[in-house]
Amino acid sequence: MSKVVLITGGSSGIGKAIGEYLSSKGYKVYGTSRNPDRIKEKFNFPIVALDVTKPESIDKAISEIVALEGHIDVLVNNAGIGITGPVEETPTDEIRNAFETNFYGPIHVMKSVLPYMRKQGSGKIINITSIAGYMGLPYRGIYSATKAALEITTEAFRMETRQFGIEMTNIAPGDFATNIVAGRYHAPVLANSPYKDAYGRTLAMMNEHVDAGENPVKMAKAVCKIIETTNPKIHYKVGAPLQKFSIVLKRILPDKMYERMLLNHYKLK
């Protein structure tokens, strides 16, 4: 019997790549989108309606999949949004929206799927976080915070749920060539802002990094490997060697030395 995999945010980017790869490996995949009716391209797996900011939408989608398949074996919490800008100039509503999507959303999805996994005595939950969640990055502080919150919560959550035969892990990607920039909230570069020059340069650099990012299939293969691993690790990182090494440096360097390294990288004073 094929394992049933639910991927939130499965209609584009990393989520789509994971869905296509797992489908090719014989998994029964369901992707999600807030508005599947607006999707014009064809997929080799079904896309169901699910908005991670609306618990009733989550419950409805998961109950429908269970009614069709009888079980959900793997949840890949992938849905998320980007957000950039000086913290001082980022609207509070946008900060809340980022947390609703990147943190509260995955928690709601896990809460909804756990009773089914607990009943079947097994299940695997893979939370897609970010290497940015391991450090406070200038002009990406809110995004870093949302992903860091999910990383830490997963550490606790996995200890609480292991008694039920449920395995939970994080996988943190670096920069991948996806359409995240198009859907990301950018605080505007204001003409009279004291952050104008520094933020403008940093924003251009961030966009370049995404455009030059790695193929999302690399993430798909990593997720597949985790699914097929018994007792997976707590944290996985997938990205360019320098991006992964930056986490090691954060751990071993004095705080101010690491901060200086980031300031030099982003050409900030």
Image (cartoon, rainbow, N blue to C red):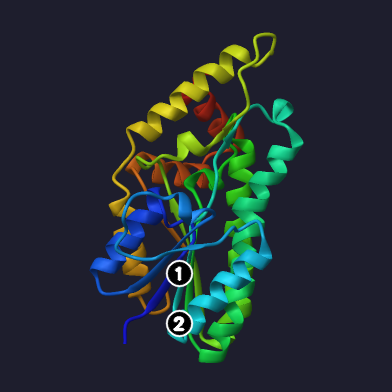
Closer mark to the observer between disc 1 and disc 2? 2
* Figure check: 166 above or below 235: below
* Figure check: 43 above or below 30: above
First of labels 1, 2 by sequence position: 1
Report the label total: 2
Q: Is residue 269 visible?
A: no
Front-most of 150 and 98? 98
Front-most of 157 and 54? 54
Please state if 177 lies on the left or on the right of 164 as rendered. Answer: left
Identify the element where label 2 is drawn.
Answer: helix
| Residue 123 image offset from top left, x and y in percent | 48, 80
- Image point 41% across, 44% down: which residue? 174
* Figure check: 187 above or below 242: above
* Figure check: 228 above or below 33: below
- Image point 57% across, 12% down: which residue? 197
Check disc 1 and report the residue beneath it: 6
Check disc 2 and report the residue beneath it: 68
Identify the element where label 1 is drawn.
Answer: strand
- Image point 64% across, 40% down: which residue? 142
Specify the amino acid type for callout 2.
Leu
Front-most of 10 and 210? 10
Front-most of 119 and 66? 66
- Image point 61% across, 18% down: which residue? 189
Label 1 crowd (10 A; few <14 / some 14-19 / many >=20) = many
| Residue 258 image offset from top left, x and y in percent | 54, 34
Q: Is residue 33 visible?
A: yes
Quadrant where the C terminus is found in the figure: top right
| Residue 201 image offset from top left, x and y in percent | 50, 17
| Residue 214 image offset from top left, x and y in percent | 30, 42
